[in-house]
Amino acid sequence: MTDKDRKAALSDDELKRKLTQEQYNIAFCAATERPFTSLFNDEKRAGVYRCVACDAVLWSSEDKFNSGTGWPSFTKPAAESVVGTKVDKEYGMVRTEVHCDNCGAHMGHVFPDGPAPTGLRYCINGAVLKFDPK
C-alpha cells in the first residue's frame, strides 16, 4: 500500500518507526501472525480493540468469541463504517479481506461461518490490535 492509498496521516516511514516489524508486515504487507500466538486470543475482559496503526476503535469485546481457530474472532465490527473489505485471491483461494477503513491496515479476513446474530466470523490478527479495557 502506498502513502497515497491511506486516509490516515502517518507516512510509510512514520509507520515503520511506530510499529514493530511484525505489526508493519501484517498491517501493510498483508502478512498473517501464527495461530495461537496473539495475547488477545484468550482475552476475556470487557473493552474495545483499536487499530495499532491509527488508534481507531474497530472491535468490541461484546462481539468477541472463541472460534477455536487461534486468532481473535468477532461477530461484527464496532460500527459498520470502521472496517472495509475487499476480495483477496492470494494463495489460490477467494476470501474477503478486512482492513481498517481509516488507515487501510490489514486486519484479517471475514468468513460466513460465525455464530448468531450475524453468522459472520471476523478472524483478526491480534498483532495489529491494541486493547483498551473498560
Image: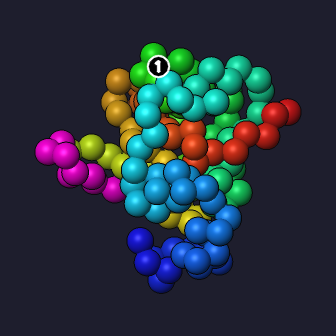
Residue at position x 28%, y 53% in the image: 87
- Give the crowd class for mark 1: few <14, some 14-19, many >=20 residues within 10 Å: some
**Relative to 35, is 86 on the left or the right?**
left
What residue is shown at x 67% (from left), y 36% (from top)?
60
Residue drawn at the location 49% of the way across and 48% of the way down: 107
Q: Quadrant where the C terminus lies?
A: top right
Mark 1 secondary-structure assignment = loop
Q: Which residue is mark 1?
A: 67
Quadrant of residue 74 in the image? top right
**Can the viewer see residue 115?**
no
Q: Label 1 is placed on what type of residue?
A: Ser
Give residue 108's quadrant in the image. Answer: top left
Q: Residue 10: horizontal and vertical position, in percent?
A: 64, 75
Residue drawn at x 61%, y 56% is 20
Q: Any magenta on residue 88?
A: yes
The magenta segment is 82-93
